[in-house]
């Protein structure tokens, strides 16, 4: 299976008994019930429901490992740190000690949403064709830089990506992250805006793969050889 190095990522460790509750109050998906050795993805939102970062959250028992986009690390930290207050939450950046790689186009029938560690590598299976790997630097886990092949796979699998579809000017509903908005969880930052968008059916968009011959090039978010990703009204 192809392997790509996600060199534009960061990895943080979150410790403390309040971590899941804290994250649940700031992100769009349900995080509070995340069990040990499970993984979930969720968008960290500001008060206007705009994306600060799109997080991959692993519960490794005793602590959480969270993967995000490197360009969003400082905005993420600046946003969450003042909100910790008396909560039992501490955040450590371990990016310099680990590499993040992506296994994609996997042919497997194994369960999704699980994470496991083996030989200094932690695997988090996001979907049946996509796994994040956090590897200690000493392992030299490797992987080619993200390239055209990975983006072609994304186009075929309708997978949004950082700085293509996912950006800080978008809400989850306007960049293809609809499935990561839990519509019946407790209060969280940006919830009122997303609920209003949903109830009025306004601003809800979907990600589609459309042949290049049939698209307006100005609306393309990821250009492919034959098809491209486009965000369109639902």
Image (cartoon, rainbow, N blue to C red):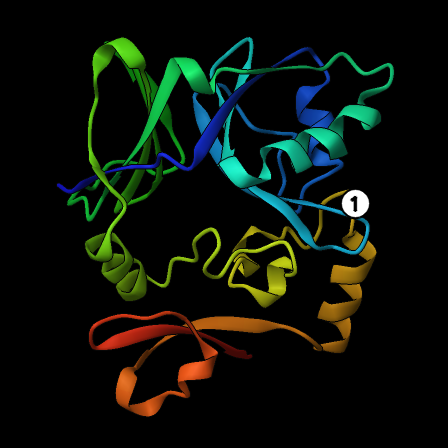
Front position in the image: 184 or 134: 134
Q: State left or right for residue 175 relative to residue 223.
A: right
Q: Position of residue 114 (x, y in %)?
A: 38, 29
Asked which quadrant contains residue 186, the reply is: top right
**How many circles with numbers are drawn on the protein?**
1
Q: Is residue 197 above or below residue 151?
A: below
- Whether 21 is drawn above or below 63: the answer is below
Q: Residue 144, how many percent across, how many down?
A: 19, 38
The residue shown at (45%, 27%) is 38
Viewer-nearest residue: 152 or 179: 152
Tell me residue 123's x, y (percent): 32, 25
- Locate the N terminus and report the quarter of the image it occupies: top left
Identify whether 39 is placed above or below 129.
Answer: above
Taking the image as drawn, is residue 80 in sight? Answer: yes
Q: Residue at horizontal 51%, vertical 72%? A: 206
Say which residue appears at 40% left-offset and 83% top-offset.
Answer: 217
Answer above or below: position of 126 versus 160. Answer: above
User: Looking at this view, is 200 or 227 the one in front?
Assistant: 227
Residue tagged by mark 1? Answer: 189
Label 1 crowding class (10 Å Cα cut-off): few <14, some 14-19, many 20+? some
Residue 12: x and y, percent? 53, 21
């Amino acid at each position: 299976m192809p392997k790509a190095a996600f060199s534009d990522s960061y990895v943080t460790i979150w410790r403390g008994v309040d971590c899941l509750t804290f994250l649940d109050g700031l992100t769009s998906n349900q995080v509070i019930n995340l069990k040990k050795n499970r993984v979930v993805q969720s968008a960290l939102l500001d008060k206007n429901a705009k994306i600060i970062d799109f997080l991959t959250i692993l519960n490794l028992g005793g602590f959480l490992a969270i993967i995000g986009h490197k360009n969003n690390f400082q905005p993420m930290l600046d946003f969450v740190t003042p909100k910790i207050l008396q909560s039992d939450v501490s955040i450590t950046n371990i990016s310099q000690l680990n590499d993040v790689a992506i296994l994609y186009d996997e042919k497997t029938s194994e369960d999704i949403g699980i994470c496991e560690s083996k030989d200094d590598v932690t695997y988090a299976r996001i979907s049946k064709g996509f796994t994040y790997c956090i590897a200690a630097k000493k392992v030299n886990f490797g992987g080619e830089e993200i390239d055209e092949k990975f983006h072609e796979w994304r186009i075929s699998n309708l997978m949004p990506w950082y700085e293509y579809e996912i950006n800080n000017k978008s809400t989850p509903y306007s960049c293809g992250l609809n499935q990561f908005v839990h519509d019946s969880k407790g209060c969280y930052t940006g919830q009122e805006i997303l609920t209003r968008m949903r109830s009025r059916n306004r601003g809800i968009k979907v990600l589609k793969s459309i042949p290049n011959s049939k698209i307006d090039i100005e609306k393309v978010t990821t250009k492919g050889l034959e098809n491209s990703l486009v965000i369109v009204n639902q």
